Amino acid sequence: DTAVSQTPKYLVTQMGNDKSIKCEQNLGHDTMYWYKQDSKKFLKIMFSYNNKELIINETVPNRFSPKSPDKAHLNLHINSLELGDSAVYFCASSQDWEPSGANVLTFGAGSRLTVL
Amino acid sequence: AQTVTQSQPEMSVQEAETVTLSCTYDTSESDYYLFWYKQPPSRQMILVIRQEAYKQQNATENRFSVNFQKAAKSFSLKISDSQLGDAAMYFCAYRSAYGTASKLTFGTGTRLQVTL
């Protein structure tokens, strides 16, 4: 059973199109995230939701809109795609509370988006 | 804002040998967590090891151990008895202990090659 699953794994599209990436976790975690990994492998957080509520929103263009219908799902919709949006997008989840407090992230396998 | 620096873009180690990957970070906080994640060619982000800043004892996980020097803000990863399967990108990451969401700040990564 995949703990954090993302679809699609690969996405190739034209500039100006709108696309979505879906994420689901079956770990019972309370918090979900979207991270972006650029072509230089640099990883940066974009958004975080806790029990369907947006709690982290980094300086991301308005073209990116996350949606969390329930705490097990976090989708990412991107409007008017640009060349610079090409990246690997990682979904992740964590439990609100762990004894150590570390709230370790469990990542999905990533979705590679290529904008032509 | 916190920053994480990995000064070694690439490292190489022979099978069965030991290698140390460097990581330094900058923060004004006293309580935080540090992580090493591994990203093999499959792209999956895998937690290798974690360290709570309030613990003086260095974390170990089988062949992986850390040298955590809080005063120097250094968090290096030692891989003993290196195996071919250890070849991957390794990312050091920082998380503040304040707040429930696991907002990780990543370093730029070190690519580890394992040779026969």
Image (cartoon, rainbow, N blue to C red):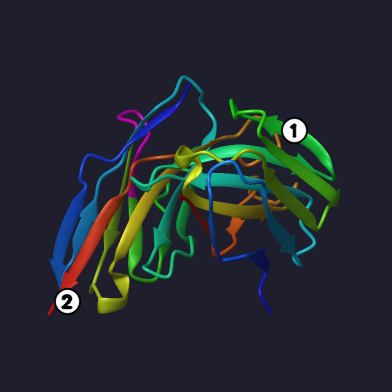
Q: Which residue is mark 2?
A: B15
Q: Share a chain, discs 2 and 1?
A: no
Amino acid residing under circle 2: Glu
Q: Which residue is mark 1?
A: A55
Let me know if residue B54 appears in the view. no
What is the distance, in whole Å, between disc 2 and disc 1 at their CAs?
44 Å
Chain part drawn in magenta: B67-73
Q: Foreground residue, B21 or A31? A: A31
Let me know if residue A41 appears in the view. yes
| Residue A41 placement (x, y as % from top left) | 37, 48
| Residue B24 placement (x, y as % from top left) | 31, 35
Chain ID of residue with mark 1 = A
| Residue B109 placement (x, y as % from top left) | 32, 48
Q: Foreground residue, A39 or A46? A: A39
Quadrant of the snapshot with the N terminus of chain A: bottom right
Q: Quadrant of residue A67?
A: top right
Residue depicted at 39% across the width and 71% down the height: B62
Q: Looking at the image, how many numbered discs can be counted on the residues?
A: 2
Chain ID of residue with mark 2 = B
